[in-house]
Image: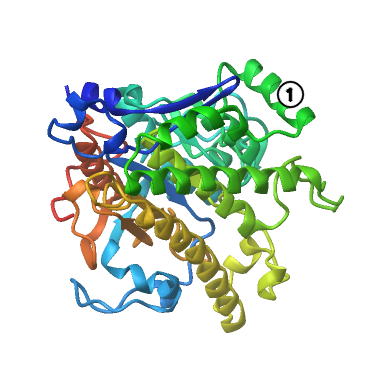
Amino acid sequence: MADEIDSSRRRFLRGAGACLALPLMESALPLALASAAAPQPPLRAAFLAVPDGMNMERWRPQGVGPAFQLNETFAPLASLQSKFQVLTGFSHQNANAKGDGGGDHARANAVFLTGARPFKTAGANFCNGISVDQLAAQQIGHNSRIPSLQLGSAAGRATGNCDTGYSCAYQFNLSWASPTMPLAPEPNPRAVFEQLFGSGPPAERQRNLLMRQQQRLSILDFVAEESRSMAGHLDGKDRHKLEEYLTSVRSIERQVEAIEKFPIPQTTMSRLEGIPADHQTHIRLMFDLLALAFQTDSTRLATFPLAHEGSNRSFPELGISEGHHHLSHHKGSAENLEKIAKIDHFYMQQFAYFLERLNAMQEADGSSVLDNSMILYGCAISDGNSHAHNDLPIVLAGGGRGTLTPGRHVEVGKDVPMTNLFLSMLDRLGVEAERIGDSTGRLKDL
């Protein structure tokens, strides 16, 4: 019943080839609905992965409970300390070799959201588990226009030998709809933009995009009359919210257009057309799109690997010429560990950017989108040099619509299956699941 009420409260701006879902605005509701008791905002969940482990000495917090002190890697999140909790003590035992030899990066990525043991093969007979986001999508995905979003900074792969006899499907795909069906991440901002704001099936959206490009029109031009009409019926607060939202959409559209206008120069590293050359620009643009998708309830579930596991990207903008994966095998070198810490700090900056966006988005009841979200950040490797899959670096941000207790460091125990956390998150999403991967029960203290 609550979902039916939520559906009746959703509003769209529609035009030829455009369909913009809007944030909930109480003054735009029919009188009967506006006078009814406001339903709770939707609960969203995103699963963000970073590659190659961490410099754990710079990552691990000091102290436990609400009085904990953030370590150096968390500096970008200092102003948001009350909005997240650091969880230590989780492990992913199925990422360990267990007689299968090398391939820790492939196993780590395959296991991160499934907890399942991936079958070692470089062929098409790969087999994993169902990821937590897709378990949720199977039961609650129908409540939003897009059941789940799979974002990426690199394209997914389903063929080839990528890591010591493991299929590329394991290393490049975070989301699995079934043990044999990985869902490829979408790295192209234009494709995500059209999925969120275009109208019709993919072929029709493509035709509409070409028409807009030929006529040099914005997608907002096709909903301009309806948006002006709606603004006239809104109170001042909601009118401002509408203006902010449309400005955000246009800002993202301009960024996408700029990337398409200036082709990426040819380099030794192949890149997909439409992908920003700058890694930070790319990540933040995808976060902007995801934030709008959550704000408008276009989707409630998302995955986003900020780089694929085993990534050997260099960071010249940080003064780092070596590849990330190469550095992760630091062999105790202080110089290498310092560079790893800089990369960890870079990714934490991008995470902080996303949380700040969600925290600034106000819901109809005065809470923020971040208050009504569960945003998981981390990876299935702690120390990259040893390929350790225990004591994982995990952050859970957001208030979970009042069901989480952020602002603290929680030691969950020793070698607790991370899938226990997933079960607890699924409970909050209203998803029925007795087990996921190697789970042994629910996590009680969240």
Residue type at mark 1: give it: Met
Residue positioned 62% across, 61% down in the render: 325
Q: In this view, does 158 lie to the left or right of 36?
A: right
The percent coordinates of residue 202 (x first, y second) are 61, 19
Callout count: 1
Q: Nearer the viewer, residue 421 or 193?
A: 193
Q: Is mark 1 on a helix, strand or loop?
A: helix
Q: Nearer the viewer, residue 46 or 231?
A: 231
Residue positioned 61% across, 82% down in the render: 335
The percent coordinates of residue 54 (x first, y second) are 48, 66
Q: Is residue 140 above or below residue 94?
A: above
Residue positioned 38% across, 62% down in the render: 393
The percent coordinates of residue 333 (x first, y second) are 58, 80
Q: Image quadrant of residue 388? A: bottom left
Question: Mark 1 — residue?
Answer: 211
Residue positioned 23% across, 68% down in the render: 408
Residue 224 in sight: yes
Q: Which of 40 and 276 is in front in this view?
A: 40
Q: In this view, does 146 lie to the left or right of 81?
A: right
Q: Image quadrant of residue 156? A: top right
Q: Is residue 295 left or right of residue 29?
A: right
Residue 107 in sight: no
